Image: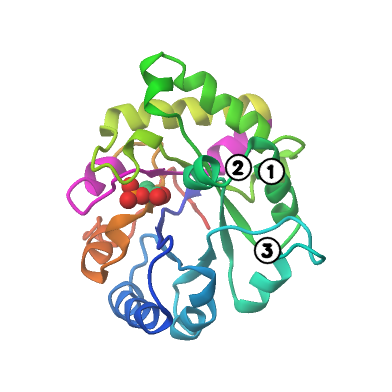
């Protein structure tokens, strides 16, 4: 089964509604014709409805940056899965390192979100990745496997088919320091090996593993040339249409998927 690449822009806490509309419109104009990958925009909650309107009728997909695991209730400040479904979202970023670092996200809360999402129409993009200290101590595989075991606890192989992973080494996020394609590929292959051991070969072959961490127009081509890198989660470079579109069009040759038949 092939893996249709995903290029997702995480807008983080950027863009007012008019700014978000303008960016979404510009990205749509440049990316709607792309057939070699899925293009995903993840604006802040406040701009989801406006961006949904801008993307209506296009091939671009809408994602949220977080979600609560309960469908409703007394959870001040939280947003539920039905609320996101209602807005036209199809994906949700879960467990981003900034959520883990600044807002107390743990593997347990990641797991609650993921379990709720695999029972919904939304696809989780589950973020994992080690810090610089963990890599320098040689613990990076252990940490990433721990995050996978915790975050994906209780999932079946069928559930696993519904998730997307994003390997984002924390030392590469927003620092301008990208993992080399070889270093990233090594971890992506290890993650796929972990998936095979946990969920079997079919799921391991189908799950998309995105790379994130200072992805730019200049390095996306070499990253995408790696056999286990199935796309990118882009932060800083997605805030301008021009740079994000250059990333989306990493393959100016047109259609490409990894491993044969396309699995979207
Ligand atoms: C991110 O936050 O997911 C990210 C990869 O950010 P940046 O591209 O800015 O490093």
Front residue of this view, candidates 247 and 257: 247
Where does label 3 land, which residue? 78
Display colour scheme: rainbow
Nearest to the eye among marks 3 and 1: give it.
3
Horizontal and vertical percent position of residue 251: 25, 56
Residue bounds of the magenta highlight: 199-224
> Is residue 61 depicted above or below 103 in this figure?
below
Give the distance between the C-alpha atoms of the residues marked 1 and 2, in whole angstroms.
9 Å
Q: Is residue 203 magenta?
A: yes
- Determine if residue 172 is in view: yes
Q: Which residue is drawn at the image coordinates 31% and 46% (left, top)?
A: 174
Where does label 2 land, which residue? 104
Badge 3 or badge 2: first in the primary sequence: 3
Q: Is residue 60 magenta?
A: no
Give the distance between the C-alpha atoms of the residues marked 3 and 2, in whole angstroms.
14 Å
Q: Which residue is drawn at the image coordinates 49% and 83% (left, top)?
A: 50
Q: Which residue is drawn at the image coordinates 48% and 25% (left, top)?
A: 190
């Amino acid at each position: 089964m092939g893996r249709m690449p995903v290029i997702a822009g995480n807008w983080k806490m950027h863009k007012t509604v008019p700014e978000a509309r303008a960016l979404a419109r510009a990205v749509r104009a440049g990316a709607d014709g792309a057939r070699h990958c899925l293009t995903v925009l993840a604006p802040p909650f406040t701009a989801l409805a406006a961006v949904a309107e801008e993307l209506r009728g296009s091939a671009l997909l809408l994602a949220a940056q977080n979600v609560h695991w309960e469908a409703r209730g007394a959870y001040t400040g939280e947003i539920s899965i039905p609320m996101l479904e209602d807005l036209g979202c199809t994906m949700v970023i879960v467990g981003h390192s900034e959520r883990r670092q600044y807002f107390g996200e743990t593997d347990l809360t990641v797991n609650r979100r993921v379990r709720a999402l695999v029972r919904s129409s939304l696809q989780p993009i589950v973020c994992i990745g080690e810090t610089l200290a963990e890599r320098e101590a040689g613990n990076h595989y252990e940490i990433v496997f721990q995050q996978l075991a915790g975050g994906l606890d209780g999932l079946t192989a069928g559930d696993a088919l519904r998730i997307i992973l994003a390997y984002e080494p924390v030392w590469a996020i927003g620092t301008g320091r990208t993992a080399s394609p070889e270093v990233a590929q090594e971890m992506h292959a290890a993650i796929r090996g972990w998936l095979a051991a946990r969920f079997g070969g079919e799921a391991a072959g189908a799950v998309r593993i995105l790379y994130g961490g200072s992805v730019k127009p200049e390095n996306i081509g070499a990253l995408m040339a790696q056999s286990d890198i199935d796309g990118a989660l882009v932060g800083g470079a997605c805030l301008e249409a021009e740079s994000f579109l250059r990333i989306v069009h990493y393959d100016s040759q047109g259609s490409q998927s990894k491993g044969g038949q396309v699995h979207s």
